[in-house]
Amino acid sequence: MSLIKKVKAYTQGRRGPPLLQTYYSLGKLLRKETIYSSNSSLIMRITPFINFTFLLVASLSIPVVFIPPPVAGIGNIILFLYLMVCAKFFMALAGLDAGSTFGGMGSSREMTFSAIIEPVTIVTFAALGLVLKTINLHEMFAATLIAPAITNPPLLLITLSLFIILIVETSRIPVDNPETHLELTMIHEAMLLEYTGPNLALMETSHAIKQTLLIGIIVNIVSPWGLATTPTAGGILLAMVMFLAKAGIVAVIIGLFESQVAKSRLFRLPGLFILAFFFSFLTIVFELLS
Amino acid sequence: MLITLFLAGTGIFLAAALITLLPALRAKKATRQIALWLGLLASVVFLGLSLQILLTQQPFHLTLYQIVPLLRLSFDVDRLAAFFMMLISLVSVSSIIYSMGLIELTKFSPDKKGLMVSAMSLLILSMLLLVASDNSFSLIFFWEIMAITSFFLVMFDFDKKESKKSGLFYFVMTQMSTAFLLFGFLTLFGVTGSFDMKPVADISPGLKTAVFTSLFIGFGIKAGVMPFHKWVPYAYSASPSNISALISGTMSKVAIYGMVRFLLLLLNPELSWGVAILIFGTFSALMGIIYALKEHNIKKLLAYSSIENVGIILLSIGLYIILQSYGLQTTAMLALLGGLFHTFNHALFKSLLFFATGSVANAAGTRDIEKMGGLIKPMPYTGIIFLIGAVSISALPPFNGFVSELMIFQAFLQSFIITSAFIKILLLLGLSMFALTGALAAACFVKAFGIIFLAKPRSKRAEEAHEAPVAMLIGPAIPATLCILLGVFSSQISSLLGFELPTPDLLVVGALLIVFFILTWIILRITANRKVRVSETWGCGIVSQSNRMEYTATGFSEPILTIFQPIYRTSKNVERTFMDNQSVVFKEGKAEINTLKIFEEKIYLPIARFVERLSTIISEHQDVDLDVYILYSLVAVIILLLVAGWIA
């Protein structure tokens, strides 16, 4: 996250925050007090925990260093996607909870975009499943380990869709602008306005986890090298270093991408989604012919 | 043993219906409460009976009354019928408990309250006997009783103009459904020579298509499939909440039962039917939820969402037929199980949502969600129950709605090995529309829950709301508990019933969720600052917040409305006048956004006008002397004879 900020700052001719700034901020937030709105209810109080928990469980589906044997169907793509939707559902509810106009607007926009990106996501993952012949993420990565995306053109197409999904789901330009607090531009931030202290820390962490997970999917599909299949200390250590490097590269790409494009008008966005949909659809048609 | 239970249940229901009909007793509070208790007992009896059959797979047969050998009321309960019996009796249990509370809060006259209990008992009984029927004669017999009793219940508030319109609409549609069914059943009778519900082997393709079409339309009307759905929002919003829950939770499921029984089991379904059902289902699901998003009358919102869910069920049935005809047995079974499970789940969460809505509407004195808000504070239990329903219906893990949608998703994903390009593209489109539906449903229920229960009250009545009486909490609490249990224990329950699902074990997921939740809480408790302060929401410098500053339901659904504008066929009407001739200084103006009721204006009204014209022509030939009538009959008989001679 900080890396993206750093890259953006460099392209804008600034020096940017230190790399570990996100962690400093989290540490600071944990020491602050919690403030609730007098309008808010139970929802506001449990949402940070729910959000964090659901993303943690979702993260079990995306191995970044080591592929364990599948247990009890963890790693099912639909389960993974819906765990993230569930986190979003509660975040949107909490956005309405304080009775602030900003929060409501954020929820409304977030739900709208989550709704129209959903078919894209599902079709993209369906395409993935079709190409790799499994609907379990763990098995998918095991498959890409043998035949990575570079050798498989349809997978590269899917990667493009995945990248767009990553941009949308993590609320980045051109969908959302994570930097501003202007009501015209914000979606995700608007829902976070009412959180304070440790709760805000939880929400921020959840968001970071989500970003890591989605980057993790892309990394594991494009270049799964280094992913350990057996739990040996050396392999895991190597995989960790490799993943950090690879995720770093994706983050740099995101940063560069963000600096190049402008935030688009809200109702222009479905066009972007259609693009992603088209790529995935193309993949499936591709598979169909071959 | 089973037969005794069956007869006992029927008898108790009839007793409940009778005592509330007797003029001497029906106005008394004690009578209707006793009748409700009797109904509860009978529902529990039927519940036990159906569970017994489901678990032991031991069907039973009973002939109750035989008019002539062909026409008889006889019953045969197999596992499919038992499954639907369980669903109906379960919803009835909670509906009856809820009614115990609600009925005393309504402003109807004591006589009417008694009648309501009576009609309700008869409605439940007729649905139970309908799914138990083993021949199409007794099925249509109970179908009509169900139609009539439910018509009375929809018309219950007949003093209101809206209810009259809804009732009439409902009556016409329900009779049309009966007419289509009768046509289908009689054609089948013509082929097989009996009303028995046995697999039909030799039937010519033309007749088979005719039977399929008429049965599909007949059951489709009752289920609320688009474009036969128009009565649904009217009828659901006109009737009291306990009745809406029954109609939506069970009556539409009875139609699903009919489809599964006749189209899947009795007739050998063809690929083209599967495609047709899939398209109808997808269309209903998507349009249903898109209309629901726009709706601010909470009961109409739920009604449209019912259309959506019926669409999802049909979609899975269509998928089953398609997969079956390509020989993919396991995946097909997964789709059908997903559909049936969704039927059950929808019955649970939709009835609970209707119950919670009824309580809320009662407390806030309105059904317009724009006038509610902040209700979770005065009504915490109702709020949590509604939340459970909203989470389940949005198909979020680890609740039951998720499991059934997951099964359908998986069936979709596994179906891409079909080689036909057309079917593949169709399934892909179906899958993406299904995904869109799911996500829009989540948006819709964020709106519903958020606007009703969160933030500040938006009207005076909403500020003074009180929690509902205990009975109105226990009623919906039963399905709410089941929503959670059926989701978390889905794998265990399905293997108990003899089906091994390839879905994730949600017990593990649920356990992980709870463990992580508690761990996070404990860690934060230790490490983080524990100070908590409650303060006003920041209002951009305005000292105290008013409810006028909150986000509204209209505002919430505006982006979606704009994106799907072509579907809604909204018409924007902006009029502006200006002070100067260059159109710069704004003087006054008004803007309206209207949603056209396309279905009503483009499909229903033309048909209605045509029928009206036709009947005007016919009525000119009525009202004449007796001899002319005799002439008519003579002509009719001659034509009939000629036709009969021509066919034979």
Image (spheres, coloured by chain):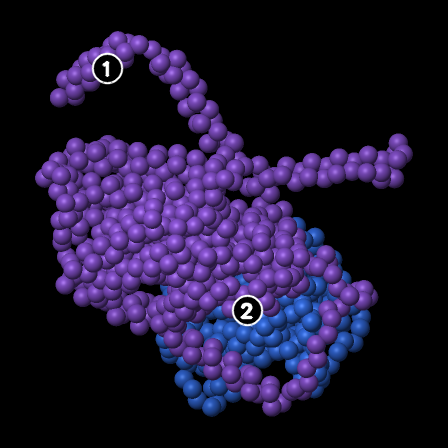
Chain colours: A blue, B purple
| Residue closer to the observer: B335 or B308 | B308
Q: Residue at x 14, y 45 (%)?
A: B65
Quadrant housing the N terminus of chain B: bottom left
Residue B190, horizontal then vertical, whole percent = 16, 32
Tell me which numbered mark, 2 or 1, is placed earlier along the sequence: 2
Q: Position of residue B583 (x, y in %)?
A: 85, 35
Residue B555: x %, y % from top left: 66, 52
Name the residue at the left extreme: B69
Residue B576 appears in the figure: yes
Residue in the foreground of this view, choosing between B469 and B141: B469
Q: Is residue B542 left or right of residue B418?
A: right
- From what the image shows, is residue B497 above or below residue A119? below
Provide the chain ID for the residue under circle 2.
Answer: B
Front position in the image: A35 or B277: A35
Q: Residue at x 23, y 15 (%)?
A: B633
Q: Is residue B102 left or right of residue B83?
A: right
Residue B380's label in the rendered image is 2
Q: Is residue A93 visible to us here?
A: no
Q: How many marks?
A: 2
Q: Is residue B323 above or below residue A77?
A: above
Quadrant of residue B416 in the image? bottom left
Residue occupied by mark 1: B633
Circle 1: element type: helix
Residue at the spot 46% in from the left edge and 48% down from the top edge = B109
Q: Nearer the viewer, residue B149 or B394?
A: B149
Report the amino acid beneath label 2.
Answer: Pro
SS at mark 2 in the image: helix
- CA gap between label 2 and label 1 equals 66 Å
Residue type for callout 1: Ser
Q: Are marks 2 and 1 in contact (CB under 8 Å)?
A: no
